[in-house]
Amino acid sequence: MSNAYSDEDGNFLVGLARKTVDEYVTQMRKSEVPSDTPKHLKEKSGVFVTLNSITSSRVALRGCIGRPYPSQPLVEAVIDSSVDSAVNDPRFPPVTPRELDTIIVDLSVLTPPMKIEYSKPEDLLNLVKVGRDGLIASRGMWRGLLLPQVPVDWKWNTLEFLEHTCNKAGLPEDAWRDPRTEFMSFQAVIFGEEKPRGNIVRDPSHPKC
């Protein structure tokens, strides 16, 4: 997965996300798919767009919404997720124009989530790999997702990763031990700005949702 997208692809996608956020926040106008979009970036893929607010003292999550499943062409998913991260994340108020110069834009392009098959819950401790996998925990209508970079950023071990994913789904932290709880895993290629409107790099070191 790490070689599935080039640095040029990352520049294109993060640039599109940045343009979309800027235009929607300042003009309430949704960006269109660029006419020079490479063909492979029009293939369907899941993606998450993450906005971090940076000040002299800290970096804080400002918005993170995406499409976990490959239901849209990637460029369209980037545009829609960028708008949602800026103004529709229920955890935060909409981004304001005066904030734009302090926002760092990152995105994660996802592989299709796959159900993890196991015979007993304890098997998950060996099947899930921190730094490689993102997780979706679900039980009935409850569902929660954490990107692969989250346990790395927070220095969680596999057990803590499982517990926090359950919490993200609104379930008790030990719900991973319940056979009714299902898990799906996915991987991601991550690109982002080094600083607001700065160079776009692979695997930027900023907190993620």
Image (cartoon, rainbow, N blue to C red):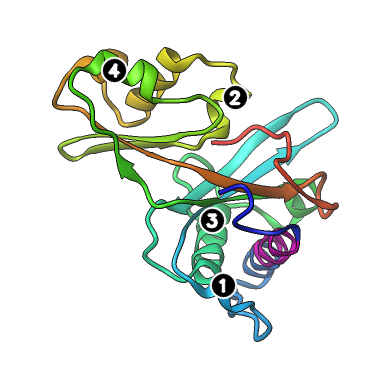
Residue beneath label 2, please?
Answer: 152
Q: Which disc, if any, is residue 40?
A: 1
Report the front residue among 179 and 85. Answer: 179
Label 1 to label 2: alpha-carbon separation: 29 Å
Left or right, residue 69 beside residue 119: right
- Please count the marks in the image: 4
Q: Residues within 10 Å of mark 4 (few under 14, many from 20)?
A: few
The mark nearer the N terminus, 1 or 2, is: 1
Task: Tell me the residue that label 4 is attached to.
Answer: 123
Give the Cα distance between marks 3 and 1: 28 Å
Residue span colored magenta: 8-18
Q: Specify the amino acid type for callout 1.
A: His
Q: Is residue 13 magenta?
A: yes
Amino acid at the residue labelled 2: Val
Q: Earlier in the sequence, mark 2 or mark 4?
A: 4
Three-letter amino acid code at disc 4?
Asp
Task: Write down the residue under mark 3.
Answer: 87
Q: Nearer the viewer, mark 4 or mark 3?
A: 4
In terms of image quadrants, where is residue 72?
Answer: bottom left
Residue type at numbered disc 3: Val
Image coordinates of residue 193 in percent, x first then y, are 77, 49
Residue 202 is situated, as x and y percent measured from the top left of the image, at 73, 46
Residue 40: percent from left, percent from top:
56, 72
